[in-house]
Image (spheres, rainbow, N blue to C red):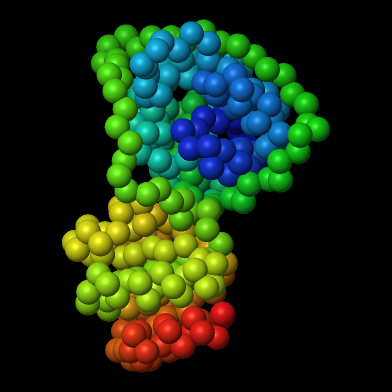
Amino acid sequence: MSKFVKVWTFNDLAAREGEVIAAGRQFGVEVRSIVVDAAKANDVIGLGADKAVVVKGLPEGAMLEDCAATIAKTITADELPAVLVMPASVRCKAIAAKVAKLTNAGIVNEVTEINDDTFTHLVYGGLALSAEKVESTVAIITMAPGAYAALEADASRSGDVIDVDFVAPAVGGVTRVGVTKKEAGSVDLGRAKRVVGVGRGFSEKEQLQLAEGFAKAMGAELGCSRPIAEGEQWMERERYIGVSGVMLKPEVYVAVGVSGQIQHMVGVNTANTIFAINKDKKAPVFKYADYGIVGDLKVILPKLQALLA
């Protein structure tokens, strides 16, 4: 039986809302979801929350990070001990640090599994798993993408909607003065059921069209290894798969021209099935693959795409 009396959730990514609530339900107790938009109250209840807690009075131009004091006060004003569950996004990790400071809470990031009051997460660049217990009255965990599948939304579910007043940060508040749309397209690889990953086996950017066509034929999203995103900058950062990038849990992962270094493969080690295509039969990726093809990707990808057409 979990030692936590109340489970709270907060989220900056609408696509991850269901996953976070599903993770909170692992404790088997009441789940309360904190939202800053009253229109989302019924949405979180439909996804499994017992109560929706709506933050009122958020100043125009305020950042989500400024909600840390509100979250801290809301949690500690209720029955303790308690746990706060959030996605392992950049913003929520920042919020986690702020809330931890205000509540003297312990934090475990990138959690992949919850077992009562024990949280499992990757360590040493994905080479090992560590099971952690948080001894503080308030525990904060950020969930790795895909760790728990979202429950089916049920519009017939009912739950209470509670209002709480926004609490301004004592110091260090940030005011948003403008919004600039990112030029790069956005993708949520963490939710993809099928993913094709490309690596340094692609010697020219134009060759990525082969992977794009193949991915489209199999109904997959396109991801990449770190050198493609951060070295060559051929693809946006959101598509980088690996220990310091996106962690996946797809049904199928196809590694094309990926050598298979541990820093990349840890990002797909929970895939149901892994395929590898590489011209080097000694490439490390074949140690992780369920199925492998040794050969030139420029020859193999068009043939596979034709078979899927």
Residue in the image at 27% along x and 72% along y = 206
Q: Position of residue 176 (x, y in %)?
A: 30, 20
Q: In the drawing, does residue 206 fall left or right of residue 192?
A: left
Whether residue 65 is visible, yes or no, is: yes
For the C terminus, which image quadrant? Answer: bottom right
Residue in the image at 42% along x and 19% along y = 67
Q: Position of residue 262 (x, y in %)?
A: 33, 69
Whether residue 260 is visible, yes or no, is: no
Q: In the drawing, does residue 210 fall left or right of residue 115?
A: left
Residue in the image at 39% along x and 54% along y = 246
Work out whether 85 lies above or below 173: below
Q: Residue furthest right?
A: 156
Q: Residue furthest left?
A: 231
Please state which of residues 255 and 121 is positioned toward the viewer in this rendering.
Answer: 255
Residue in the image at 57% along x and 38% along y = 17
Q: Position of residue 271 (x, y in %)?
A: 52, 67
